[in-house]
Image (cartoon, rainbow, N blue to C red):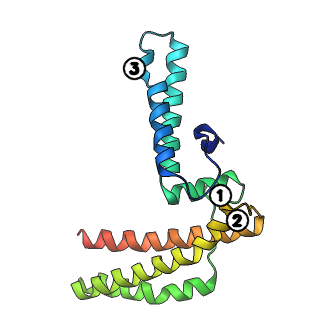
Amino acid sequence: MENYFELYGLPVKFELDAAALRAKFLELSRTYHPDRFATAAEATRADALKRSAMNNDAYKILGDADRRMAYLLKLKGALEEEEKYTLPPAFLMEMMDLNEVVSDYEQTGDDCNKKQADSALEQELTSWKEAIEPLLERFDDGDESQELLVRIKDFYFRKKYLLRIQERLNTFASR
């Protein structure tokens, strides 16, 4: 697995300096842009194209907090590719109310129900953020324990669940 943090010379953290990230992306974009190698040998052009694509992938992943979280968890061995994760039953029970509100909206199409569903989802996402921030700060401050990574992974999957509900709401609303 390519280490994008190393590529960009950035610390392995959940919270990154967005300006430093963008500056390194632009620097590497200029360095490896395929147009600069148009007259070079085939192997050199292929290498530049590969490095340019890697730079684009790195920026796309490190520039998005959710993708960065998944990537960092994979990098640290706490998350497997295409991992099937079972969310805790207590969390799923809490989500029953939110799913009911979303179902009510899907059944009625009523704007009042949409507002209620959006509000309930926003509340859950805010609670998620408030709960995970201290964990991410602990990691960024140097605690890379497996216990902490497992807790962060749980929150990663909880957010994926919430984002699927959000997608469900958005899909229904766009009909």
- First-in-chain label (3 vs 2): 3
Quadrant in which the C terminus is drawn:
bottom left
Residue at 74%, 61% in the rendered image: 144
Q: Label 1 belongs to which residue? A: 73
Residue at 67%, 59% in the rendered image: 79
Amino acid carrying mark 2 in the image: Leu
Q: Which mark is residue 35?
A: 3
Q: Horizontal and vertical percent for residue 83? A: 63, 60
Judge from the rendering whether residue 141 lies leftward or rightward of residue 97; answer left or right: right
- First-in-chain label (3 vs 1): 3
* Tag 1 and tag 2, C-beta contact below 8 Å: yes
14 and 173: which is toward the camera: 14
Helix, strand or loop at disc 1?
helix
64 and 13: which is toward the camera: 13
The quadrant where residue 92 appears: bottom right
Is residue 110 at least partly visible in the picture? no
Q: Label 2 belongs to which residue? A: 149
Q: Is residue 73 above or below residue 170?
A: above
- First-in-chain label (1 vs 2): 1
